[in-house]
Amino acid sequence: MSSRCRWLIAVSLLGLAGAALAQDIPANLPKRKPGLWEMQTSGMGGQPQTTKFCLDAETDAAMYKMGTHMSGQMCSKFNIDVQGGNKVVTDAVCKIDTPNGAVNMTSHSETTYQGDSAYSTQGHITYNPAIMGHADMTMTSTGHWVGQCAAGQKPGDMVMANGQTFNIKDMPGH
């Protein structure tokens, strides 16, 4: 996987996965059911992107820890609020080092969980200066549990829309 692709994934994770940005992960943060998840993200320009992700409890926690590591290095402000047991509201101000220099990112996202088998996120991100011609971006992401992970998959395996596979545990910060 190219470093640019990994960088874009990291920016998307920072912008949308507000729960993953927590400096201190709330004990009441909703958990996702182990198995194969299908996630669709739109708003990054172009067509919606669908990915599949093999998840277990350890990988779910590892993703939060990866986000904690990333946010601790990059975010000057972070607020996370779990509301009503099924909604996570996140606000963050972060500085991202890009191939073209530092970018200030401000994000707000709201993720609503439907039990442990589905979620939807709406988020808004602003970039200063703009990234790839975008000064701000409204993004949506939905995810739902599909079933057991496919034969040969291990927890952390992510299959991108183009068929490329990598394991999130191999990303920096994990």
Image: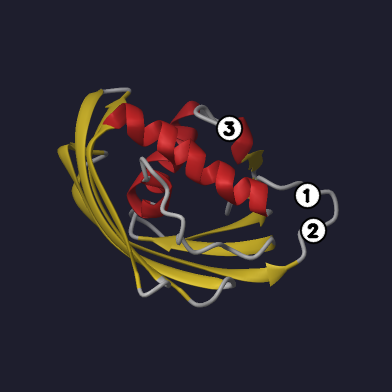
The residue carrying mark 3 is 1
Residue ID at (57%, 71%): 116
- Mark 2 and mark 1 in contact (Cβ < 8 Å)? yes
Q: Nearer the viewer, residue 58 or 55?
A: 58
Q: Which amino acid, mark 3?
A: Met
Q: Is residue 35 left or right of residue 73?
A: right
Query: For the residue carrying disc 2, how many other residues have a C-alpha within 10 Å: few (<14), some (14-19), or many (20+)?
Result: few
Local secondary structure at mark 3: loop
The vertical placement of 14 against 80, above or below, is: above
The vertical placement of 61 against 68, above or below, is: below
Sooner in the amino-acid sequence: mark 2 or mark 3: 3
Q: Which amino acid, mark 1?
A: Gln
Q: Which mark is residue 153?
A: 1
CA separation in Å, label 1 and label 2? 6 Å
The picture quadrant where one finds residue 48 is bottom left
**Mark 2 or mark 3, which is nearer to you?**
2
Q: Is residue 3 left or right of residue 124?
A: right
The residue carrying mark 2 is 150
